[in-house]
Structures are given as structure tokens and as C-alpha cells.
Image (cartoon, rainbow, N blue to C red):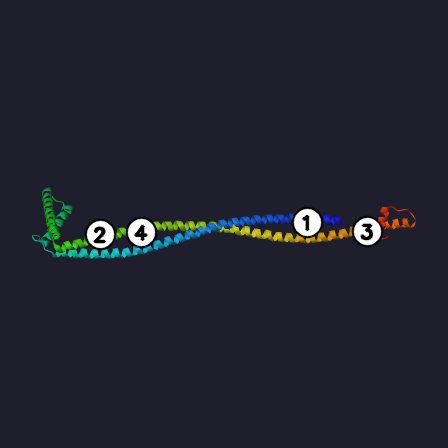
């Protein structure tokens, strides 16, 4: 019985050590899972903030794209108007007669100039004849320039052409202003696109880091749960063993008591026989007889 109790006591100590070890590992794993959960949540919050910022930039970009589309339509309308005005101006120029300048004469001179220039470029001429052609070209060219300058001067002072030129100038300014505005907004769109792409890349990288932290959180959470289950099992085993040990100790005490009582009875029987034979017993002997129930 004593050897069995010693064996169970050793086993009890071993299981108690297991219980403490499982508690230690469970708490360590729980602390790790908590640490990774905190880091993961920080990154998840950061991802949320970055997404909101990206959404705002995307909305801003879409607004700018709408502005550009509207401006392009307005610009195209202005250039169409400008083209119409230029045609109207060209038609008006042809229709207006300038005093002292015959349009047909001007056209004839331009045609003759072109003919002479072609002749000079494509025909092998004698020196004297070539000098004559060059002289005629120079003369015609000067005459044409003079006639055109006179015509432009007269046209610029004409009320109808002046009003049309002013309109053309104004529409051209408006069209160029639209184009400049479009270029400015387009540059802003490009810059926003780069910022958005960079932010989306950062979001993906941060999301990936958060996922990796979440995997670590799951790993240590599972480990903590496993250690807790092992702790419960070891604790139950310890409690069951303590019941067995308690029962064995109770039985051991009862057996020891029984053995002690048997020895007392045996000793008291011997003393009682001596008492009956008239021997003188000591006070201690009498107490033994009394305790054994002989007196």
C-alpha cells in the first residue's frame, strides 16, 4: 500500500507539473495571439482610412474627368464656330472689292509668278534668259506683295471684315483658354491617377501584412485553445488521481489502525493472563487493559 501511494504521489507531482506547463503555454500563446490581433487591427484601420482617402480621390478624379469632357465639348464647339467664321471671312474677302485693286489681276500675277518660278527650277536657261526670268519673278513678287498689303489695309478698315476679325480673335482666345484649362485639369487628373495607383498599391501591401498577422493570430489562438484543453484534461486527471490517492490513504489509515488495535489486543490479552495469575501490574499495564476493554 505504501509503495503504491508513493507511486501515485510521484504521478500526481508529474501531472501537476503538466497542469502548470499547460497554463504557462496557454497564457503565452494567448498573449501572442492578442499581440498579433492588436497589430492586425491597427493595419485594418489603416487600410480603411486609406480606402476612404482613395475613394475621395477617385471621386475627385471623376469630377475632373466630367469637367474635361464638358470643356472639350465647349472647345470643339468654339473651334467649329471659329472654322465657320474663317470661311465666312474668306468668302467676305473675296466678295469685297478694294478700290484700285482688281482681284482677277492679282490672281493672274500670282499664277504668272508660279509659272516663272517653275520655269526657273525645271528648265535649263541661258544666262541672259535666266537673268530676265529672275528679274520678272522679283518684279511680280514685289507687285503682288504691294497689292496684298494694300488690299489687307483696305480690308482691315472695312467695318464688316473688322467686326468679323474681332469675332474670330475673340473666339480663338476663348478656344485657346478652354484648351489651356483642359491641359491644366488633365495634368491634375494624371497626378491624381498616380496618387490613386500608389495608394491602391499601399492598400494591397498593408492588407497583405494584416492578413499575415491574422494568420499568426489564428495560429496562436488555436495553440492557446489546444493548451487550455490539455490543461483541462490534465486538471481532470489530477482530480481523479487525488480521489484515488485520498481513498488509498483512507484505506491505509484504516489498515494501520486495525493493525494497531490487533497489537493492542494481543498485548492486553498477555497482560490480562498475567493479571489473572496474580502478577502485579504497573499503572501503564492497567491503562493498556482498560484501553483494550479488559477492565
Tag 2 secondary structure: helix
What residue is shown with label 4?
Answer: 186
How would you rate the neighbour count of disc 4 (Cα within 10 Å): few for under 14, some for 14-19, many for 20 or more? Answer: some
Q: CA distance from mark 2 to mark 1?
A: 98 Å
**In front: label 2 or label 1:** 1
Disc 4 or 2, which lies upstream in sequence? 2
How would you rate the neighbour count of disc 3 (Cα within 10 Å): few for under 14, some for 14-19, many for 20 or more? Answer: some
Extreme-front residue of the structure: 283
What residue is shown with label 2?
Answer: 173
Q: Nearer the viewer, residue 200 or 38?
A: 38
For residue 261, which numbered disc appears in the image? 3
Judge from the rendering whether residue 6 lies leftward or rightward of residue 99; answer left or right: right
Tag 1 secondary structure: helix
Residue at (67% x, 47% y) in the render: 13
What residue is shown with label 1?
Answer: 12
Is residue 3 visible from the viewing direction of this image?
yes
Q: Nearer the viewer, residue 236 or 270?
A: 270
Tag 4 secondary structure: helix
Residue at (75% x, 48% y) in the render: 2
Q: CA distance from mark 2 to mark 3?
A: 128 Å
> Would you say the residues marked 3 and 4 are in contact, meaning their CB atoms lie under 8 Å apart?
no
> Would you say the residues marked 4 and 2 are in contact, meaning their CB atoms lie under 8 Å apart?
no
How would you rate the neighbour count of disc 1 (Cα within 10 Å): few for under 14, some for 14-19, many for 20 or more? Answer: some
Amino acid at each position: 500500500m505504501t509503495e503504491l501511494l508513493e507511486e501515485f504521489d510521484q504521478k500526481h507531482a508529474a501531472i501537476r507539473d503538466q497542469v502548470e506547463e499547460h497554463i504557462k503555454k496557454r497564457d503565452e500563446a494567448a498573449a501572442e495571439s492578442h499581440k498579433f490581433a492588436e497589430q492586425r487591427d491597427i493595419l485594418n484601420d489603416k487600410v480603411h482610412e486609406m480606402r476612404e482617402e482613395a475613394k475621395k480621390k477617385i471621386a475627385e478624379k471623376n469630377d475632373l474627368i466630367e469637367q474635361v469632357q464638358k470643356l472639350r465639348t465647349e472647345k470643339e464647339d468654339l473651334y467649329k464656330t471659329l472654322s465657320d467664321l474663317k470661311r465666312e471671312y474668306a468668302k467676305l474677302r473675296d466678295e469685297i472689292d478694294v478700290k484700285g485693286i482688281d482681284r482677277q489681276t492679282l490672281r493672274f500675277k500670282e499664277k504668272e509668278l508660279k509659272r516663272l518660278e517653275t520655269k526657273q527650277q525645271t528648265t535649263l536657261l541661258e544666262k541672259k534668259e535666266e537673268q530676265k526670268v529672275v528679274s520678272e519673278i522679283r518684279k511680280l513678287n514685289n507687285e503682288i506683295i504691294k497689292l496684298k498689303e494694300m488690299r489687307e489695309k483696305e480690308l482691315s478698315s472695312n467695318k464688316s471684315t473688322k467686326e468679323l476679325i474681332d469675332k474670330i480673335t475673340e473666339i480663338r482666345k476663348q478656344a485657346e483658354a478652354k484648351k489651356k484649362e483642359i491641359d491644366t485639369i488633365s495634368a491634375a487628373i494624371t497626378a491624381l491617377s498616380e496618387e490613386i495607383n500608389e495608394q491602391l498599391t499601399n492598400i494591397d501591401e498593408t492588407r497583405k501584412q494584416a492578413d499575415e498577422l491574422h494568420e499568426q493570430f489564428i495560429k496562436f489562438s488555436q495553440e492557446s485553445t489546444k493548451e487550455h484543453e490539455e490543461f483541462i484534461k490534465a486538471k481532470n486527471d489530477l482530480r481523479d488521481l487525488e480521489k484515488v490517492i485520498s481513498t488509498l490513504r483512507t484505506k491505509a489509515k484504516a489498515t494501520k489502525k486495525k493493525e494497531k488495535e490487533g497489537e493492542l489486543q494481543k498485548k492486553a490479552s498477555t497482560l490480562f493472563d498475567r493479571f489473572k495469575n496474580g502478577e502485579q501490574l504497573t499503572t501503564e499495564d492497567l491503562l493498556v487493559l482498560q484501553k483494550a476493554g479488559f477492565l
